[in-house]
Image (cartoon, grey):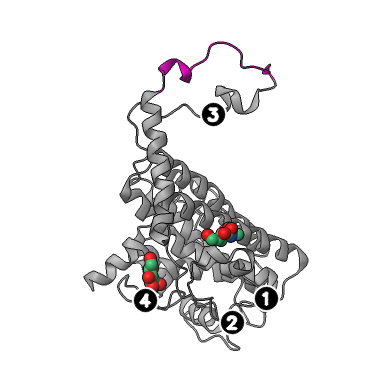
Amino acid sequence: MARARRAVPLLLLLLLAVAQLGAPASAAVSPTAPPGGGGGGGGDDDPRCHPSPPRRGAVAVYPSDMAELQFLLNAKFVEAEWFLHAALGRGIDFLDRNLSAGGPPPAGARKASLDFHTTEVAAELGYQEVGHIRAITQSMGGFPRPAIDLSDGRFAAVMDDAMGVRLDPPFDPYASSVNFLLASYILPHITASAAVGISSTLMGYASKRLQASILAVEAGQDAVIRLLLYQRADELVAPYKGHTVAEFTRRISDWRNGLSRCGAKDEGVKVLDRHQGAERRTISNILGAGDDSLGFARTPAEVLRILYGSRNEQIPGGFLPRGGNGTIARGFFQLA
Ligand SMILES: *[C@@H]1O[C@H](CO)[C@@H](O)[C@H](O)[C@H]1NC(C)=O
Ligand SMILES: *[C@@H]1O[C@H](CO)[C@@H](O)[C@H](O)[C@H]1NC(C)=O
């Protein structure tokens, strides 16, 4: 039943692709003004409001595209539950029971103690993730929500690991707006770099469009969180003495680099060395990026090494205690 439901959108996309084959080429470029259109734009009928149609014979979605885009669901379920619970005290089951497809509710997630402005940001980002999960599952198929650990102990362990000290009292991601933002700093950067990472393997035009549309918003989420942290970069994170917000972000970025074992693809919001800034000239690093300010790319293995906290895509743990799902994440277990 579930399998049949998932197959339908793919079939539609393939049919659309086939329909394009039969469409007269002239339909693509209309020299005459569209009905009702002046300079103001004619809306849905106006071909100038739509991207050029795919080339003849172009395929909307390849089966391998489905696995790549479904892979993003692993991180997106974590993000959706994190942001929604922090903002509203409830997660995606409250919005749409179908999205989890029977997967277990997240462990340890709860409403965070946030100021109004941060609550608004968290809720918006959480709802965006719900939209992305729906968009991926409806067009590419999906899988049940994996087991997710969002307990304060999980975040405390991450922060201890990142800071290289045992923070006392343990870091509580739900305790304040700044703690929530630091905890949030961990997630969208991973998903954005994962979305960049799959771009070169996607082949279908509908797959590429979905990937780009998700990346546009995911990178924005990362930037929003990073800007909010940059505004407090020099503040000390209470009650810890001597550790600024900027230092936390640098350490978390280094932690992600270390776990993923593929070099430096991650930098804090305020860097110590201008060489890491834009055009090697800034110490603000609100949009972390590599040479020529191009976004960093991570492979699925790197993403899982971080989300599992194990440095190993074959050993689940961390935010996904029983591992990710879908062909790619499960495939690593078969290798184990
Ligand atoms: C959930 O799935 C059921 C059965 O397929 C459907 O009737 C219902 O409309 C869906 N709910 C939402 C919110 O999509
Ligand atoms: C992965 O998804 C399948 C269905 O696609 C489900 O049967 C299985 O229980 C899921 N595994 C985990 C670990 O969530």
Q: Nearer the viewer, residue 53 or 239?
A: 53
How far apart, in angstroms, are the residues tagged by discs 4 and 3? 43 Å
Residue 324 in sight in this render: no
- Label 1 residue SS: loop
Indicate which disc residue 50 carries.
Answer: 3
Whichever of callouts 2 and 1 sits on the residue coming sooner in the sequence is 1
Q: Disc 3 vs disc 2: which is toward the camera?
A: 3
Q: Disc 2 vs disc 1: which is toward the camera?
A: 1
Indicate which disc residue 171 carries.
Answer: 2
Magenta extent: 23-39
How far apart, in angstroms, are the residues tagged by discs 2 and 1? 16 Å
Quadrant of the snapshot with the C terminus: bottom left
Q: Which residue is mark 4?
A: 316
* Rendering coords of residue 87 (x, y %): 68, 69
Indicate which disc residue 111 carries.
Answer: 1
Q: Is residue 290 above or below residue 155?
A: above
The residue at 59%/82% (across/down) is 171
Q: Is residue 16 above or below residue 132?
A: above
Q: Quadrant of ligand 2?
A: bottom left
Is 149 left or right of 83, judged from the image as shown? Answer: left
- Label 3 residue SS: loop
Please report contact status of discs 2 and 1: CB closer than 8 Å, yes or no: no
Q: Residues within 10 Å of mark 4 (few under 14, many from 20)?
A: many
Q: Nearer the viewer, residue 314 or 261?
A: 314
Inspect the image, locate mark 4, and give the three-letter code of the amino acid beneath it.
Pro
How far apart, in angstroms, are the residues tagged by discs 1 and 3? 41 Å
How far apart, in angstroms, are the residues tagged by discs 4 and 2? 23 Å
